[in-house]
Image: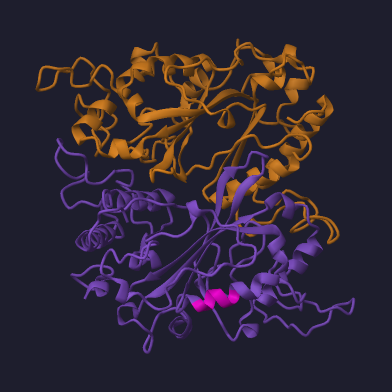
Chain colours: A purple, B orange
Amino acid sequence: MMAGTTREDLIELLQDWSYAAARMTQGLDVSASGAVGGSPEAPPDDTGEALGLAANGLTITFGVGPTLFTAADGTDRYGLADRRPALLTALPAFLGDDLEPDHTGGDLCIQACADDPQVAVHAIRNLSRIAFGRARLRWSQLGFGKTSKTTADQATPRNLFGFKDGTANILADDQAALDQHVWVGDGDEPAWLIGGSYLVARKIAMLIETWDRVRLSEQERITGRDKAHGAPLSGGQEQTAPDFSAVGTTGQPAIDARSHVRLAHPGLNKGIRILRRGYNYVDGNTDLGRLDAGLFFLAYQRSPAQFIALQRALSRDLLNEYIRHVGSGLWAIPPGAEEGSYVGAGLFA
Amino acid sequence: MMAGTTREDLIELLQDWSYAAARMTQGLDVSASGAVGGSPEAPPDDTGEALGLAANGLTITFGVGPTLFTAADGTDRYGLADRRPALLTALPAFLGDDLEPDHTGGDLCIQACADDPQVAVHAIRNLSRIAFGRARLRWSQLGFGKTSKTTADQATPRNLFGFKDGTANILADDQAALDQHVWVGDGDEPAWLIGGSYLVARKIAMLIETWDRVRLSEQERITGRDKAHGAPLSGGQEQTAPDFSAVGTTGQPAIDARSHVRLAHPGLNKGIRILRRGYNYVDGNTDLGRLDAGLFFLAYQRSPAQFIALQRALSRDLLNEYIRHVGSGLWAIPPGAEEGSYVGAGLFA
């Protein structure tokens, strides 16, 4: 948010965003006034680059960060301090964090996903534009592909280390798991967030060239799965449950105790699961000619504590030698707007 | 290329690239030795992130820059100085150039295009990896969408200013136009380049937020076309030829003399045409919260003189107030490899 914006400005922004998002997700421009909107003597309401394109599965998700409720200097700019979810505080520092302030935090967030990047970019751009004078873009990240499987008929996509990623992700039609692990539900606080979720974003740079020089058996030991098929090293197929007690030919555990699959496994983390909805990214290359690339990790969960516990469990992950967390954010995700209302209305009720 | 590489290293690199490109464009990994290539005790031949994905229309195009023939210090590293096409010299400076050295030039270039960005990124990454110790990535650019129409049944895509872009582009099935304007042909020099082309790359940053505040009538005056349909302001439909003598209601020319469509029009540029095959890009945002976005302009032509003439004609373009050329490159594109040979073999014959 920009200095000088009021509570009313914030409400109007959320209303304007809700209206525009509802239109864009139907494949319409952001304006109700015509194909490019407005009169010849005014700037077009819609920037136009998605005209003629269908909605392409566009989804738009809004979130509110801890600093919206209480600014860094402690001020309660929008009269929201007593509405802050107790769980919505800055994430703790994790071992190995190398966060860049320019890619961390934010009072508000928007995730736009579509099958056509032009449609997703159009959404972010027009929502940013609508915010003019009220909020400004702090950071943004363009991603591609799907890093995680969210439907049963979808093959598990691969991350930029070449491994299947998200084999055990919560599926979008697994209502019981969503209710248990993803949606803020009955008994949770605050009431305005019930039906919503918490989004954790982590920009994870991957040391691509270093990884590419690691021998296959070591890549698989680090991951705990085989590269070709994604099967756990204890045997079976991709969907076979890993057997952490299995012993390999050398007498060592078939799945290394510090492998990624073991440390992240719900069975060793009190059953904790999260809904991953992240993307691969490539931001060109570094001065050394290395790809500036990695995983834009996005996870939805009922409580930030789920991510925090998993991330702490991963502090001993063998994979850490090949990745760096360079950006981070946590936002509460209000439930979708009710008919005739707007996203986040419950915050101000 | 890296210091110390020899003529033989360069030949082997082009051979290795040709082999890998032929496999990847068929949807195969870069290795002939298995699903992820190699033995468990060696790094995989292929980085793996495109395993299980089809070719997705992948095309890979290689080019050789002026500095491959004669290095900046004048040395003839590869015994190629006398093979350099006379037309392959550094592009002249253009009015308003604001080129960043980190996004300009290069001894070699690769353009990889695919319907799935994961496939295109996989190609660039594996070709970069194959070059290890011989050449290193100087700069790269990820783009999305199609900025230009290259088939008759394709709707003209829009650039990030929201306008249809490439209405008059050369179509891929217009053999006569390709022969006249794009392919180096009979009577051209040198012989090894016949059947090839010249590629000009320009990274054109677009001042998105400034443009978005320009009223519609002014956006259309600058462009010379209407925003909704792409029709010339002299009237008609998108494909109607612009009438530069038409007079508008105010007595002024219907199409401004300094509009983009007029200055770039073949009719006012001795019939010059080019084949555009560029993409939109978004590189996140600037410290000011503005989108760091624009057009990665890529054009193929029979001679660099075509681009040079057009770009000079555009020096008075009203659009220049809203764009900045921040990267540039020129490469000669050898014809595709003959069966059993490799891309660029003619260079060494």
Percent of width and height locating residue B134: 77, 34
Q: Is residue A24 above or below residue B127?
A: below
Question: Residue at position x 57%, y 43% from top?
Answer: A284
Q: Is residue B341 above or below residue B68?
A: below
Residue A228 makes an appearance in the image = no
> Which quarter of the rendered picture does the N terminus of chain B lie within?
top right
Question: Residue at position x 69%, y 18% from top?
Answer: B72
Q: Is residue A173 above or below residue B295?
A: below
B328 or A65, which lies in front? A65
Query: How many numbered badges does the structure rendering display?
Result: 0
Q: Is residue A24 above or below residue B193?
A: below
**Left or right position of A276 against A230:** left
Q: Magenta-highlighted stretch: main secondary structure?
A: helix
Percent of width and height locating residue A255: 77, 76
Percent of width and height locating residue A89: 44, 71
Q: Which residues are magenta?
A: A305-310
